[in-house]
Image: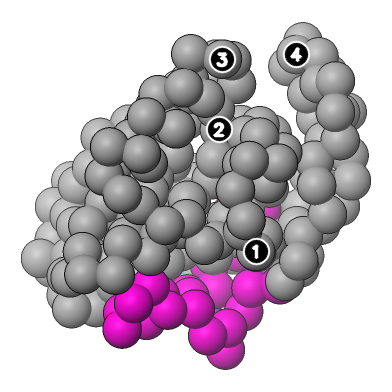
C-alpha cells in the first residue's frame, strides 16, 4: 500500500509530497520545495520518524516553487532525480525564474539523472508509479497515478476548483485543458487528487465543481 504525506513549503505555499510503500518503506519525494532550515528539518524529521528509505526525487514540472529543495535532497540523500525532459530549460534557468519572483537562489539546481515519460518504470516496493503526460501548464508536466489506492498527484495541472496558469514560458491553455480532459477526467470519480497547491479533492468533485471544465 502507498502512503502519502503532504508538506506545504516556501513563499509560494507549494505542496511537497512524500509517497512511500508501507511494507518496504521505499519512497519518492515529489516536488521538493523546502526553502529554509526549519522546512528542511521538518522534512528530515518525518523521514527519520517513519523509517522512510528515500530513493527518488520526482518533479511533476520544474517551476521554481517545485524545485527549491532539490539540491538539499540530492545533497543529503542517495536519490535518483527524475524530471520531464521538456522542462529541463526551466532547471537551467532556475536563477532567472527565482529572480522573476524576487527570490535569490545561491546554488544551481542539480542536473537530473533521468527523464520522465509514460514509459518510465518507477516502483516503490511492489507499487508502480504510473506517469501520465499532462503538458500545458509547463511544456513537459506529468501527473503521478497510483491505481490501487486511487491517488493522483496532479502538480499544477488540476487544483481543487481551479487549473494551472498558462501565462508562463512554454504554457498553452488548450493543451492544458485537453491534458485534463483526456488524462485526468478519464480516471475513476473516486480518485483523490493531491495538487501542487491547496487542498486535495476528487476527480468526481472537479467534474461538477471546477469552473474551468464546463
Ligand atoms: Zn507550476
Mark 3 closeness class: few <14, some 14–19, many ≥20 residues within 10 Å? few
CA gap between label 2 and label 4 equals 13 Å
> Looking at mark 3, is its residue's CB closer than 8 Å to ligand 1?
no
Work out how far the residue at label 3 is from the one at label 1, CA to CA, in angstroms.
23 Å
SS of the residue under disc 1 = strand
Instruction: Name the element at disc 3.
Output: helix
Residue 123 place in picture, x, y as percent:
42, 79
Badge 4: few (under 14), some or many (20 or more) residues near its Cα, within 10 Å? few
- The earlier-in-sequence mark between 1 and 2 is 2
Which quadrant of the rendered structure holds the N terminus? bottom left
- Coordinates of residue 151 in the picture (x, y in percent): 24, 63
Q: Give the SS element for disc 4.
A: loop
User: Distance from label 2 to label 3 (Cα)?
Assistant: 12 Å
Q: Position of residue 191 (x, y in %)?
A: 17, 65
| Of the pair 24 and 192, the residue shown nearer to us | 24
- The numbered disc on residue 37 is 3
Where is mark 2, residue-wise?
Answer: 33
Quarter containing the C terminus = bottom left
Where's residue 26, x and y in %?
38, 65
As for residue 131 lying within the magenta part, the answer is: yes
Residue 139 vs 132, above or below: the answer is above
Instruction: Give the residues drawn in magenta, as a range.
Output: 115-138
Name the residue rendered at 53%, 45% in the picture. 31
Amino acid at each position: 500500500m502507498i502512503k502519502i504525506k503532504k508538506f506545504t513549503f516556501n513563499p509560494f505555499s507549494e505542496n511537497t509530497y512524500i509517497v512511500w510503500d508501507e511494507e518496504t518503506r521505499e519512497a519518492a519525494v515529489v516536488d521538493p520545495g523546502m526553502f529554509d532550515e526549519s522546512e528542511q528539518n521538518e522534512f528530515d524529521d518525518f523521514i527519520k520518524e517513519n523509517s522512510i528509505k528515500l530513493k527518488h526525487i520526482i518533479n511533476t514540472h520544474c517551476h521554481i516553487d517545485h524545485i527549491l529543495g532539490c539540491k538539499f535532497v540530492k545533497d543529503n540523500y542517495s536519490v535518483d532525480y527524475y524530471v520531464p525532459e521538456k522542462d529541463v530549460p526551466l532547471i537551467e534557468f532556475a536563477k532567472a525564474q527565482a529572480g522573476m519572483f524576487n527570490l535569490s537562489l545561491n546554488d544551481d539546481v542539480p542536473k537530473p539523472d533521468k527523464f520522465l515519460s509514460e514509459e518510465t518504470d518507477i516502483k516503490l516496493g511492489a507499487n508502480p508509479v504510473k506517469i501520465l503526460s499532462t503538458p500545458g501548464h509547463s511544456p513537459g508536466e506529468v501527473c503521478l497515478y497510483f491505481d490501487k489506492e486511487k491517488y493522483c498527484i496532479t502538480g499544477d495541472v488540476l487544483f481543487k476548483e481551479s487549473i494551472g496558469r498558462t501565462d508562463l514560458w512554454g504554457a498553452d491553455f488548450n493543451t492544458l485543458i485537453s491534458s485534463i480532459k483526456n488524462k485526468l477526467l478519464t480516471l475513476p470519480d473516486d480518485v483523490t487528487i493531491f495538487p501542487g497547491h491547496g487542498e486535495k479533492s476528487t476527480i468526481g468533485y472537479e467534474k461538477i465543481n471546477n469552473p474551468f471544465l464546463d
